[in-house]
Amino acid sequence: MLQAHDTLNNVVSLFSLDQETIVRHKRKGLFYCPVCKERVVIKSGGKMVPHFAHLPRSACSEKGGGEGEYHERGKLKLYEWIKAQGIHTKLEPFLPSIQQRPDLLLSIQNKRIAIEYQCARIPAETFKKRNIGYKKCNIHPIWILGGNRMNRLDGNTLSLHENDRLFIHQFTSGFPLTMYFYCPNSNKLSFFQDIICTGKKKSFGIISFQHLHHLSFLDLFQKKTWNQTQLLAHWQWEKYTQRTRYSPYPSKMERKWRGVLYQKNLHPVLLPSITHLPTRGQLQAKVPPWLWQSKLVVELIEVLPVGAIFTRNNCYALLKQLFYPPSRFPLIQQIPNAIDSYLHLLTKLEYIKPTSSFHFQKIKQIDYPKQVEKAIQDDNALMEQLLVQNDANVYVTF
């Protein structure tokens, strides 16, 4: 932290002090955390941003947020960037009503916005608790992850741990799913937008890097989305790798489902092409798209004769345990419903048709490929069908 209280309860801000004063405080001063009231010590020297840190055995709830030099330097740069724009900004203000201390607190256009710069992992419960606190105070949180937490796999793909998905934002129902990363070393802010999860850890989206000095605070709300043709082309490769690259370390749920498929004389790489399709609501799923989509096809749609009727609730009941509740993602205004999106795709592909808002009729038999080569051909034909529909202005949602 960059601020602490002295023995007279005065706020001491290290970033505003000269080096001589900092050295004197470090030798003789006593300072305390404004949240837990425990003693903190000054860390300084070399190129390090002077900051306060809790003692090793501290139980303070704020300690887990990451008090390292990288975090403190990034926080200070973000503070100076926002303040230079004439926006009323407080650094590490303590909010006694909720016993929380955001990194930054902004007042802009009659709104209060908390900026949390998160360089270390925190438990999901801690994240949830902090957001509940902000909601009680009518404060809108924006979480910016440290650049040290960005794990880029290729031009458009990041590795996102289950915990990382908590930090995906959607400010309005029409805003693309967005994450932010900031690196104080390069002084660049990274945007990861229109995010589509392809598996338990892999996600792709529009990635851009911009120097902080070239951005205004309102630029955080810019929108970048996939062109549908780009998205489908990217997913065509995703389907190919899903067919040809066997995962040697499947999760417990994946192992269990593979066992069910083997009992039915089915192999995961020879599932129908209508499984493993992109949906923006995939971030809510506990399992990869191939798993829950094949479960829906194999255990519900496939067993029905052509012409039979099933309901949305049949689908929801079958897959309920494979999805997190929307409340797990408090930064998202409206999570796209992955199951509804998938049913929409099956409708466009003419395997089912809606007979009412809640009922669907199976209108085509589902084919299972016998060889991987045939499966890949079927995948390519299906993606081409979606591309043609997109070119013909048939709106295909994911």
Image: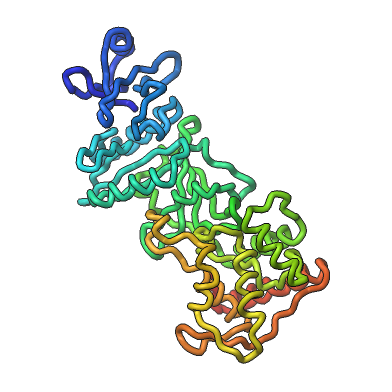
Q: Is residue 380 visible?
A: no
> Looking at the image, which is closer to me, 301 or 346?
301
Left or right relative to 374: residue 131: left
> Looking at the image, which is closer to me, 159 or 380?
159
Residue drawn at point x = 64 percent, y = 53 percent: 251
Q: Residue furthest left?
A: 8
**Residue 325 in the image: x percent, y percent?**
44, 61
Q: Is residue 120 visible?
A: yes
Q: Residue 89: which quarter of the image?
A: top left
In the rendered image of this protein, does residue 344 appear above or below residue 72? below
**Residue 104 in the image: x percent, y percent?**
30, 38
In the rendered image of this protein, does residue 276 appear above or below residue 159? below
Q: Residue 126: which quarter of the image?
A: top left
Q: Residue 238: which quarter of the image?
A: bottom right
- Count of number-bearing discs: 0
Residue drawn at point x = 64 percent, y = 66 percent: 276
- For the C terminus, the quadrant is bottom right
In the rendered image of this protein, does residue 99 appear above or below residue 287? above
- For the N terminus, the quadrant is top left
**Residue 374 in the image: x percent, y percent?**
81, 71
Residue drawn at point x = 60 percent, y = 52 percent: 202
What colour-coding does the image apply? rainbow
> Looking at the image, which is closer to me, 1 or 394?
1
**Residue 39 in the image: x percent, y percent?**
30, 20
Residue drawn at point x = 32 percent, y = 20 percent: 40
Left or right relative to 265: residue 312: left
